[in-house]
C-alpha cells in the first residue's frame, strides 16, 4: 500500500512541476509574439502604397497621374485623380459604370449599350432602350420641362408653361412636336385621331380609311383606297385614285415652271416624272427605270433592278454610278468615291470635304481600316484584323489590343465594358506615357516622364525614377517580402518589406534630372523637373 501511495504522489508532483514550467514558458514567449506581430504589421503595405495581387486586387499609380483600383480581374474598376480622393469613375463591368467630370457633369451606363444616364447642370436624361426614356431640363428662367416615353405606348410630359400632356397608345392621349407633327391627339386609335402641322388640322376616322384637312393655305380629304387629295397653296398638289394604282402629283410649286416637279404613275406598269428639262420613266416598278437631262448631259439606266445600274452625271452634281450586283458597285461624286465587290463583303471609301480627307476599306468581318487627315494636317487611324488584333490612333494616343473578338466597327464604349473579358494584352502610348495590361491585370506597366513602373502580380516589380539627378531602380520580389534599391551613387541598399507588395508610393516622384539651361538661369530654374521622359 505504501509504495503505491508514494508513486501516485510522485506523479502528481511531476505533473504540477511540468505545468508550472509550461506556464513560465508561455509568459516568456508572449513578448516574442508581440514583437513578431509588430514586425509583421510594420512590413505591411499601407493604403497609400501600390498593391498588386491580380486577379484578386490591384491598386496602382497611373502614368500621367491618378490611381486605379481593380478587383476580380477587372470586374470592378475605379479611378481617382489623386490618392485618397473621390472616385472620378467606377464600374462593375459589364453591368454598370459611372464617370464624373471636373464640372460635375456625370454619365452612367448600365447593360451597355441599352441603358444610359446623363446629368449636367440643367439637363438629365435616363433611358433603357427600347423600353423607357425620361428627360428633364431647366431653362434659363428656371422653368422645368420633362417627358417620359415608355412601352407599350405610354407618354407623359410637362411643359415649361405648366401644361401636362399624357398618352396611352392606342387608348387616348395628346402629344406635341412628335413624328414631324406639331400636335397629335387620338382616342381609341385608329377610330379617331387629330394631327396639326404648319397651321393645318387633319381629322382621321378609322385611319387610314377616312380623313379631311383644313387650315392655313391648304386642305385635303381621303376615302382610302378609292380616292384622295391633299394640297398646300403654291407648294404641292397630290392625288390618287384606286390606291396604289393611279397617282398624280405636282411638287415644289414655289420653284416656278422650270423648278417644279410633275409626276404620275399607273402602278406598277408605268410612271413618269418631269422637272424642267429632266425626264424620268419607270416600267414594271421597281425593275426598269430610265432618266435623262439633255441640258446637263445626265442620263441613268436602272434595270433589271437591283442587278444593273449605269449613271452618267454629265455636268450635274448627281455623281457617277456603276453597278453589277453583287459583283461590284461604284459611286463617285460630291467628294465621295466608294466601291464594293461581292457586296457587302469588300468595300473601299474615300471622302474629301473641304480640307478633311478620309480613306477606309472593309472586308466583312475580317478587315477594317480607316485613315483621316484633318484640316490642320493631323492624322488618325483605326485598324482591326478580326479576331486577332485592333489598333486605334487619334493622333495623340495610340491603343493596340489582341485578340479583338468583337466583329463590330470602332466601338470604344463597348470595348471598355466587355473587352477586358478576352483581351490578352493591351498597350496604350502617347507623347509622354506608356501603359500595358495583360489579361486579368496580371502584368501591368505605367510609364511617364517621371517614372517607369512594371509589375508581374506578386512575383516581381520594378520602379525606375530619378532622385537628385541620379537614376534609381527599386525592385520587389515575392509579394514585397524582398525589396532593394540600386543606383550608381549609393549602390545596393535593402528596403523594408511591404507586404503584399510591391509597396511603391502612389504619389509618383517628379523627375529631378537637370535640364540644359542658359548660363543666366536661376537656381530655381535649375531645380525644375526635366521635360524628357525617363528611360
Image (tube, rainbow, N blue to C red):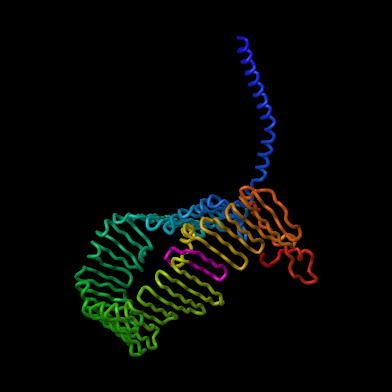
Percent of width and height locating residue 526: 76, 65
**Residue 161 in view:** no
Q: Is residue 520 left or right of residue 534?
A: right
Percent of width and height locating residue 419: 47, 60
434 drawn magenta:
no
Q: Residue at x 69, y 48 (%)?
A: 496
Q: Please say if 324 is above or below 161.
A: below
**How many numbered circles are shown?**
0
Report the span colored magenta. 389-408
Q: Is residue 81 left or right of residue 494?
A: left
* Residue in the foreground of this view, choosing between 265 and 221: 265
393 drawn magenta:
yes
Q: Is residue 152 left or right of residue 122?
A: left
Percent of width and height locating residue 49: 64, 51
* Residue in the foreground of this view, choosing between 183 and 200: 183
**Residue 228 in view:** yes
Percent of width and height locating residue 261: 31, 81
* Residue in the foreground of this view, choosing between 245 and 380: 380
Q: Please say if 463 is above or below 532.
A: above
* Residue in the foreground of this view, choosing between 479 and 326: 479
Q: Pick out the residue farthest to the right.
A: 520
**Quadrant into which the N terminus falls:** top right
**Quadrant into which the C terminus falls:** bottom right
Q: Please say if 386 is above or below 86.
A: below
Amino acid at each position: 500500500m505504501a509504495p503505491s501511495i508514494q508513486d501516485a504522489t510522485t506523479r502528481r508532483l511531476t505533473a504540477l512541476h511540468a505545468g508550472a514550467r509550461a506556464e513560465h514558458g508561455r509568459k516568456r514567449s508572449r513578448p516574442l509574439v508581440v514583437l513578431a506581430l509588430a514586425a509583421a504589421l510594420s512590413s505591411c503595405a499601407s493604403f497609400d502604397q501600390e498593391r498588386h495581387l491580380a486577379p484578386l486586387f490591384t491598386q496602382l499609380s497611373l502614368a500621367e497621374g491618378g490611381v486605379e483600383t481593380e478587383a476580380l480581374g477587372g470586374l470592378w474598376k475605379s479611378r481617382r485623380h489623386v490618392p485618397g480622393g473621390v472616385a472620378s469613375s467606377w464600374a462593375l463591368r459589364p453591368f454598370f459604370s459611372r464617370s464624373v467630370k471636373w464640372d460635375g457633369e456625370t454619365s452612367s451606363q448600365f447593360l451597355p449599350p441599352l441603358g444610359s444616364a446623363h446629368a449636367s447642370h440643367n439637363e438629365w436624361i435616363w433611358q433603357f432602350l427600347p423600353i423607357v426614356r425620361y428627360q428633364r431640363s431647366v431653362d434659363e428662367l428656371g422653368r422645368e420641362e420633362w417627358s417620359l416615353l415608355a412601352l407599350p405606348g405610354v407618354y407623359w410630359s410637362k411643359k415649361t408653361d405648366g401644361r401636362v400632356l399624357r398618352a396611352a397608345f392606342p387608348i387616348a392621349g395628346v402629344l406635341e412636336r412628335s413624328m414631324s407633327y406639331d400636335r397629335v391627339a387620338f382616342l381609341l386609335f385608329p377610330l379617331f385621331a387629330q394631327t396639326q402641322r404648319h397651321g393645318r388640322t387633319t381629322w382621321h376616322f378609322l385611319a387610314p380609311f377616312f380623313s379631311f384637312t383644313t387650315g392655313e393655305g391648304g386642305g385635303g380629304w381621303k376615302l382610302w383606297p378609292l380616292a384622295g387629295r391633299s394640297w398646300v397653296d403654291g407648294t404641292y398638289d397630290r392625288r390618287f385614285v384606286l390606291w396604289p394604282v393611279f397617282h398624280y402629283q405636282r411638287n415644289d410649286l414655289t420653284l416656278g415652271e422650270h423648278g417644279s416637279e410633275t409626276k404620275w404613275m399607273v402602278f406598277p406598269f408605268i410612271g413618269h416624272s418631269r422637272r424642267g428639262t429632266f425626264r424620268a420613266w419607270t416600267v414594271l416598278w421597281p425593275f426598269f427605270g430610265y432618266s435623262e437631262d439633255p441640258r446637263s448631259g445626265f442620263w441613268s439606266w436602272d434595270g433589271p433592278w437591283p442587278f444593273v445600274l449605269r449613271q452618267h452625271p454629265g455636268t450635274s452634281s448627281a455623281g457617277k454610278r456603276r453597278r453589277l450586283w453583287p459583283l461590284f458597285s461604284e459611286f463617285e461624286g460630291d467628294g465621295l468615291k466608294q466601291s464594293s465587290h461581292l457586296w457587302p463583303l469588300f468595300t473601299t471609301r474615300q471622302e474629301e470635304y473641304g480640307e478633311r480627307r478620309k480613306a477606309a476599306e472593309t472586308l466583312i468581318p475580317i478587315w477594317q481600316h480607316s485613315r483621316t487627315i484633318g484640316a490642320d494636317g493631323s492624322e488618325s487611324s483605326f485598324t482591326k484584323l478580326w479576331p486577332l488584333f485592333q489598333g486605334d490612333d487619334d493622333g495623340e494616343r495610340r491603343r493596340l489590343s489582341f485578340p479583338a473578338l468583337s466583329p463590330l466597327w470602332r466601338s470604344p464604349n463597348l470595348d471598355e465594358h466587355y473587352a477586358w473579358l478576352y483581351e490578352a494584352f493591351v498597350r496604350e502610348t502617347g507623347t509622354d506615357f506608356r501603359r500595358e495590361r495583360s489579361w486579368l491585370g496580371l502584368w501591368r506597366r505605367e510609364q511617364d516622364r517621371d517614372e517607369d513602373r512594371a509589375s508581374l502580380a506578386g512575383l516581381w516589380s520594378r520602379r525606375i525614377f530619378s532622385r537628385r539627378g541620379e537614376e534609381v531602380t527599386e525592385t520587389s520580389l515575392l509579394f514585397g517580402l524582398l525589396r532593394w534599391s540600386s543606383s550608381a551613387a549609393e549602390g545596393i541598399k535593402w528596403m523594408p518589406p511591404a507586404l503584399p507588395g510591391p509597396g511603391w508610393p502612389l504619389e509618383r516622384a517628379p523627375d529631378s534630372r537637370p535640364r540644359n539651361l542658359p548660363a543666366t538661369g536661376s537656381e530655381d530654374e535649375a531645380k525644375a523637373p526635366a521635360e524628357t521622359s525617363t528611360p
